[in-house]
Image (cartoon, rainbow, N blue to C red):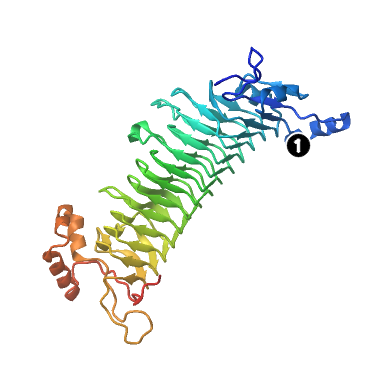
Amino acid sequence: MRTEGCGGVCTDGRPAVRGARILAVLLALGAAPLAAHAQAHAHAHAQVTVMAPPAASASARPGVVVYAGLAEAVAAAAPGSTIRIAAGTYRGPTVEVRTPGLSIIGEGWPTLDGEGQRELLVVRADDVTVRGLRFVNTGVSHMQDRAALRVIESARCRILENRFRDALFAIYLQKSSGCEVRGNEIIGASRDETSNGNGIHLWYSPHTRVLDNRIRGQRDGIYFEFSRGSEARGNRSEGNRRYGLHFMFSDSCRYERNTFRANGAGVAVMYSKGVTMVGNGFLDAKGSAAYGLLLKEITDGALTGNRFAGNSTGLYLEGASRLSIADNDFVENGWAVRLMADAEDSRFVGNLFRGNGFDVATNSRTLRSSFDGNWWDAYRGYDLDRDGAGDVPHRPVRLFALVVEKHPEALILLRAPVSAVLDGAERVFPVLTPALADPRPLMRAPR
């Protein structure tokens, strides 16, 4: 691995002042008893540090070793060591970390450049921390899921506060567990789907925490597969080519206070159970195949306090069952909720529906989900007993919504008088729309 500028002292005796320099400071362990103690507890107590001070002063200090590059420093480091990398651009072969407990810390955002040809850093050890680095330019490969930073069969890694630019996959965890991915900034090249990978990709990586990251311009912002018991919190995933979050075969996961905005197809959560989604924003997913949130073959989950706004379809349920959907806002979507015939035994309580083209749509006259105590801006009932709930049930499925479900081209007539005539006739003689009603619609918006 080579650096820009001189490392150490230049050949003419000048101190090196340009580019990046990597030096290893091996802290003296002192007297023999202390050395023996350090050796016995190497993983917990080793304090080897690799850093880049001005070369002249560093070379005068005892115990200093000058490495030719980062790969050599990583290979020589003892368990529990800290490697500090100075600002600069570093190019060379992929660096592999096999030392447990190693911390690799960037100072001044040093850049690891893949030159469009390779992965940059591969971790194959437990308890490794990577912080403060800039990863760029992995290049595109159609034969390999090439990642800027890959973690393989490791536990308790920490990927913290790094920057990724123009990477096929930015962070890729495979068969790893108990890791934390926090505070990273990922900006992809926003290529087409076939030439672009995911921002944060988990594969068979359970109990991972994905926190406070910023991702845009990738294929999928965050991707979970076979990663049960994981958590995504405080992330912002926007402007990705396909999904802001794509999630499959991962039970008992929690998503909280994330923002998913203007992603090509929105968010898809599929083939899992026990998923909890709280306080998220599903925003501005627009297109014929775009959804704020698509739930497919999901069971025994909960959606609470989320906001669905500005989407072609806010919430789409197919094969979803036994869900609690409570206290969410559905605002100015084309379709707020689309319930397919095979979506069963879910309960909608305390939700707000305002300014949607269609509040609820379905492809069946028989539905086995329920609505109770929601607020609807289209409700025209009354509350004579003043208990806060309407005395007349609200039927949220419009007849015109059924027409559009069968004949999508009819959507052009949404604001035409004929749609109002159809809906008015169905309210008087409700024989065509599903027997779906909210028996206690709220008279005042809950929020």
Residue pictured at 63% horizontal, 25% vertical: 22
Q: As rendered, which of 238 and 232 lies closer to the eye? A: 238
Q: Give the number of callouts.
A: 1
Read off the residue under disc 1: 45
Residue 45 in the image, given as x and y percentages of width and height: 76, 36
Residue 293 in the image, given as x and y percentages of width and height: 37, 53
Q: Secondary structure at mark 1?
A: helix
Residue pictured at 35% horizontal, 46% vertical: 263
Query: Is residue 365 rendered to the left or right of residue 88?
Result: left
Q: As rendered, which of 334 and 53 lies closer to the eye? A: 53
Query: Is residue 146 rendered to the left or right of residue 408?
Result: right
Residue 59 in the image, given as x and y percentages of width and height: 72, 21
Q: Residue furthest top?
A: 12
Q: Residues within 10 Å of mark 1 (few under 14, many from 20)?
A: some
**Dividing the image into 4 quarters, which one contains the N terminus?**
top right
Q: Residue furthest left?
A: 418
Quarter-of-image position of residue 414: bottom left
Q: Amino acid at mark 1?
A: His
Residue 7 in the image, given as x and y percentages of width and height: 62, 20
Query: Is residue 146 rendered to the left or right of residue 360?
Result: right
**Dividing the image into 4 quarters, which one contains the C terminus?**
bottom left
Q: Residue furthest bottom?
A: 385
